[in-house]
Amino acid sequence: MERHLSAILAADVVGYTCLMEADEEGTLTRLKAARSEVVYLKIAECDGRIVKTTGDGMMVEFSSAVEAIRGAVQVQEEMTARSGDIRFRVGVNIGDIIIDGDDIFGDGVNLAARYKKRDCRKNKVKFSIRREADKNET
C-alpha cells in the first residue's frame, strides 16, 4: 500500500439540512456557485487536490500544511465577503494517509473530518498536527 504524509482538509456546509428543507433548488444553486466561483479556485491556487465531493461535503489533499491552512482561510474569507447563507465548516489535519487509486484513507483523513465537527461556528478553521509518536502515547 502506498502511504505518505499529507495535509487533509474536510469541509461541509453549516446547516445544510435546514437549508435544503427550506429551498432545495436554491440551496443547490448557491452551493454549486460557491464551489465553482470560490472553493475550487482557492484550492487550485494553493495546490490542493480535490479527492471527492459528496453532497455538501468535500475532502481535499495538500502536500503542504501551510497551503492547506491558507486555502481554508481564503475560502472562509471569501465566503464571509459574499454574506450569503452558504458557510463552510472546515477541519484540517496533517497525518499519514493511505492512497488507493484516486481515493485516500486512514486516521489522517478521519481526524480531519472529526475536527470540522468540533466547532461549527461560521468562518472557523479547525486544524491539528499530531505526530505518529503522540498517537502511540495516548
Image (cartoon, grey):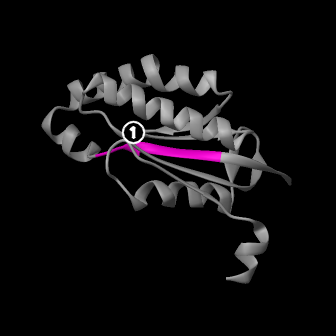
The residue tagged with tag 1: helix, strand or loop? loop
Quadrant occupied by the N terminus: bottom right
Q: Main secondary structure of the magenta part?
A: strand
Q: How many marks?
A: 1
Q: Which residue is outermost to the top?
A: 37
Could you classify mark 1 by the number of other residues whose Cα lies within 10 Å: few (under 14), some (14-19), or many (20 or more)? Answer: some
Quadrant of the image for the C terminus? bottom right
Give the side of residue 27 with respect to residue 115, left or right.
Answer: left
Position of residue 21 relative to residue 30, above or below, is: below
Residue 84: x %, y % from top left = 24, 28
Instruction: Residue 13: say if magenta.
Output: yes
Residue at left 41%, top 30%? 77
Q: Is residue 5 left or right of residue 42?
A: right
Asked if the magenta segment contains residue 67, the reply would be no
Amino acid type assigned to the residue bearing label 1 in the image: Asp
Q: Nearer the viewer, residue 27 or 120?
A: 120
Instruction: Say which residue label 1 marks.
Output: 56
Q: Position of residue 15 (x, y in %)?
A: 26, 46
User: Vertical placement of 91 versus 129: above or below?
Assistant: above
Q: Position of residue 25 (x, y in %)?
A: 22, 26
The magenta span reads: 8-14
Left or right for 99, reference 89: right
